[in-house]
Image (tube, rainbow, N blue to C red):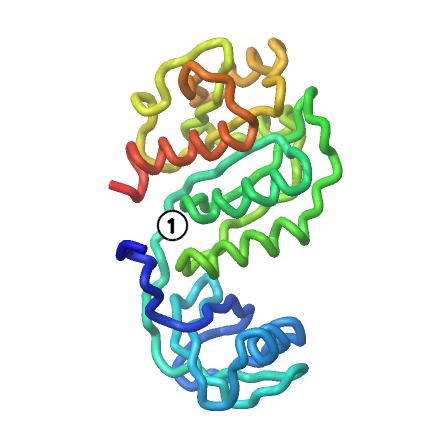
Amino acid sequence: MPATPAWPPTSGPRLFVDQPLQPGALVTLDKAQANYLFNVMRLGEGDTLLAFNGSDGEWLVTVEEAGRKKMSLRAERQTSEQERLLDVTLAFAPIKKGRIDWLVEKAVELGASRLLPVVTQRTIVRDVKMDRLEAHAIEAAEQCGRTAVARLDPPMKLEAMLKAHDGHPLYFADETGGAPAIDSFAPAPATLLVGPEGGFTPEEAEAIRRAPGATAISLGPRILRAETAALAALAAFMASTGDWK
């Protein structure tokens, strides 16, 4: 495999912890994390790994106590500062299990700071398993080197989402036509809105157009699946005016 920024790997496991990280801080892991590090990764006392909590950057930590049900880590030093978040919300219609998991995972990897499921008239999936999606978001942040975990908001109806919108740029994928996405984006803050399979109804599209700051964008000449469209819009934003530059 050719060398890339992520290969070959330069460190051991990387773990999200919901506890403060500072020099000498003791972090106690839950049973699932202890089981993963002890039984799966085979870590013992004195071994090191990386940890982050979403606010204090990334830290080198040492296993101080090891067991399959109980494990504690000691924070040694900061290895990366807390990332500077772009205020980019990806608003998407919920889709089937598996596909929505993949969407959330890849959106975190691409750098979204907020994920918002939006229920539209043509949305088929209404029961969104938030705990599962949050777990996927955390796992994605662990794997891709982020020091922040994207905020995952509870589902909102499209009408409520538009009513709560504060007027910053809102780019929505309009299947009936719009300006090329790559030419439309301005720097963050931004909300990217993508509808369900079948798209927005004409009434919904008109309501979105009337929203303050709304711009209809085109994602190209082909019909994209809902999850593909959402990630294409996010990738285009990051490439044109986000943190890929």
Vertical relation: 205 (above or below) 244: above
As rendered, which of 170 and 122 lies closer to the eye?
122
**Position of residue 99 in the picture relative to residue 109 (left or right):** right
Residue 122 place in picture, x, y as percent: 68, 21
Helix, strand or loop status at disc 1: loop
The residue under label 1 is which amino acid type? Leu
| Residue situated furthest left in the rendering | 245
Vertical relation: 183 (above or below) 78: above
| Residue situated furthest right in the rendering | 127
Kindly identify the residue that appears in the image at 46 percent across and 17 percent down: 222
Kindly identify the residue that appears in the image at 32 percent across and 39 percent down: 242
Kindly identify the residue that appears in the image at 33 percent across and 22 percent down: 184
Vertical relation: 216 (above or below) 92: above
Mark 1, Cα crowd under 10 Å, few <14 / some 14-19 / many 20+, is some
| Residue situated furthest front in the rendering | 1
Residue 164 figure quarter? top right
The image quadrant where one finds the C terminus is top left
Residue labelled with disc 1: 85
Residue 24 place in picture, x, y as percent: 42, 86
Residue 30 figure quarter? bottom right
As rendered, which of 49 and 152 lies closer to the eye?
49
The image quadrant where one finds the N terminus is bottom left
Residue 210 place in picture, x, y as percent: 51, 14
**Position of residue 20 in the picture relative to residue 159 (left or right):** left
Numbered marks: total: 1
Kindly identify the residue that appears in the image at 55 percent across and 26 percent down: 225
Residue 89 place in picture, x, y as percent: 48, 38
**Position of residue 7 in the picture relative to residue 47 (left or right):** left
As rendered, which of 220 and 215 lies closer to the eye?
220
